[in-house]
């Protein structure tokens, strides 16, 4: 049975709560998550003591975002190992919790491989668990370092494409510190522009149906002191037509071998708008998000989420007449069917550049992506 509970430390509210952290209280190791479903109304931490609890947190989007899912998956394997659960069973459950996000399975398999290697070398279960935990911590550090390098490369690309500063950037979904061991992917680039005095405005798509832009990106932008404005997703076209967007920056959940990009639903229409209006459309993601085993966009398994996310408005914090806390207020007739893919796929010809920790790929081609991945492997090998 999953042991999962929450607490809000209102008496000692920190200025910055990490999106994920490993703790070892007297009662045993736990994985502590900032529950992103409760933001921005309250900062509440979710404590997972086993893999099933983490699987539920992943599926409910309490923890989300491609890079952070990889880190969470690795820690989940370590948690199962340290607490004496079946590691392979935990790894399989974690890896399949969200099928589109390639980083999740990658992080899981990395910690699982470290665990198996320790056992193969004659280590006992405690040594194998320690190896899995070390692999998770290493991945966490690598993600933070990758975030900083992506911000640097992304800002350099913006300055090259848009000399003079005063960047007006449109972003979609949430790509900041809530999805990363560092300061994020696309949001980290915008944050670097802000710190350099070159960000004029961050346009934040609300990102329906779960409002990750309104709830999370606006939350991070406000905490960072950035000039930002929230808009409904269907207002983006008007913004482009008015000439108010200089660049689009998004993250990615999976990038295929040919450069197709799976990202939060609503990303593809922005790419089409950007192309029509001659605005750079830039994807920012670590090399780990590139999946060379998936040849093209048509081969991506796109997660279909529950229809009630579209047919109801969720009110998790404030009791509303006719709705239970944590439930939803119906906004469509009872029995209405909903189309609710979590992601859409943008073809490489609509992508101006893919920014990774190893530099920017532009134009986006299979050959250029393969070279970046090979370069990353050479760096990792030392």
Image (cartoon, helix red, strand yellow):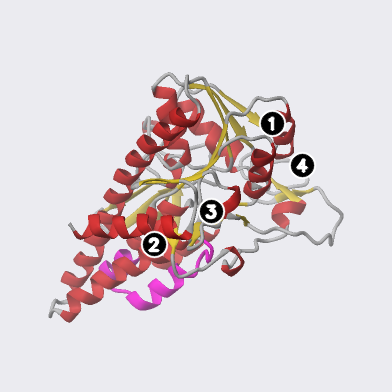
Circle 2/circle 3 CB separation < 8 Å: no
* Distance from the alpha carbon under mark 3 to that under mark 1: 30 Å
Q: Secondary structure at mark 4?
A: loop
| Residue found at x 50% / y 68% | 294
Q: Quadrant of the C terminus?
A: bottom left
Q: Position of residue 88 (x, y in %)?
A: 35, 77
| Residue found at x 60% / y 63% | 303
Using the image, tell me which numbered label, if any, was put on residue 73.
2
Q: Secondary structure at mark 2?
A: helix
| Residue tagged 3 | 61
Circle 2/circle 4 CB separation < 8 Å: no
Q: Secondary structure at mark 1?
A: helix
* Distance from the alpha carbon under mark 2 to that under mark 3: 13 Å
Could you tell which of marks 3 and 1 lies nearer the N-terminus? 3
Q: Which residues are magenta?
A: 77-100
The answer to which quarter of the image holds residue 160 is: top left
| Residue tagged 1 | 240
* Distance from the alpha carbon under mark 4 to that under mark 1: 39 Å
Could you tell which of marks 3 and 4 lies nearer the N-terminus? 3
Q: Quadrant of the N terminus?
A: bottom left
């Amino acid at each position: 049975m999953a042991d999962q509970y929450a607490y809000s430390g209102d008496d000692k509210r920190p200025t910055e709560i990490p999106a994920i952290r490993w703790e070892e209280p007297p009662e045993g190791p736990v994985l502590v998550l900032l529950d992103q479903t409760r933001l921005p109304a309250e900062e509440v931490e979710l404590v997972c003591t086993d893999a099933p609890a983490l699987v539920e947190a992943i599926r409910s989007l309490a923890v989300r975002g491609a890079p952070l899912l990889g880190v969470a998956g690795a820690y989940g394997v370590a948690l199962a190992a340290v607490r004496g659960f079946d590691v392979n069973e935990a790894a399989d459950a974690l890896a399949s919790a969200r099928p589109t996000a390639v980083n999740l399975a990658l992080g899981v398999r990395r910690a699982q491989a470290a665990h198996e290697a320790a056992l193969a070398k004659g280590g006992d279960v405690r040594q194998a668990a320690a190896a899995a935990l070390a692999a998770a911590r290493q991945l966490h550090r690598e993600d933070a370092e990758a975030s900083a390098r992506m911000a640097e490369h992304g800002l350099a690309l913006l300055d090259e494409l848009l000399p003079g500063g005063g960047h007006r950037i449109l972003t979609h979904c949430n790509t900041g510190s809530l999805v990363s061991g560092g300061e994020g992917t696309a949001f980290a680039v915008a944050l670097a522009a802000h710190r350099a005095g070159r960000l004029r405005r961050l346009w934040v798509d609300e990102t329906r149906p779960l409002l990750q832009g309104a709830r999370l990106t606006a939350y991070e932008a406000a905490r960072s002191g950035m000039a930002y404005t929230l808009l409904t997703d269907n207002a983006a076209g008007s913004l482009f037509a008015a000439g108010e967007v200089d660049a689009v920056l998004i993250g990615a959940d999976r990038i295929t071998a040919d450069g197709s990009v799976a990202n939060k639903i609503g990303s593809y229409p922005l790419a089409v708008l950007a192309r029509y209006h001659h605005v750079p459309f830039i994807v920012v993601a670590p090399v780990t998000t590139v999946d060379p085993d998936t040849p093209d966009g048509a081969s991506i398994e796109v997660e279909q989420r529950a229809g009630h996310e579209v047919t109801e408005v969720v009110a998790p914090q404030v009791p509303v007449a006719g709705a239970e806390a944590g439930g939803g207020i119906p906004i469509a007739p009872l029995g209405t069917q909903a189309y609710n893919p979590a992601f859409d796929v943008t073809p490489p010809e609509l992508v101006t550049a893919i920014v990774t920790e190893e530099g920017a790929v532009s134009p986006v081609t299979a050959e250029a992506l393969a070279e970046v991945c090979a370069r990353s492997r050479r760096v990792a090998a030392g």
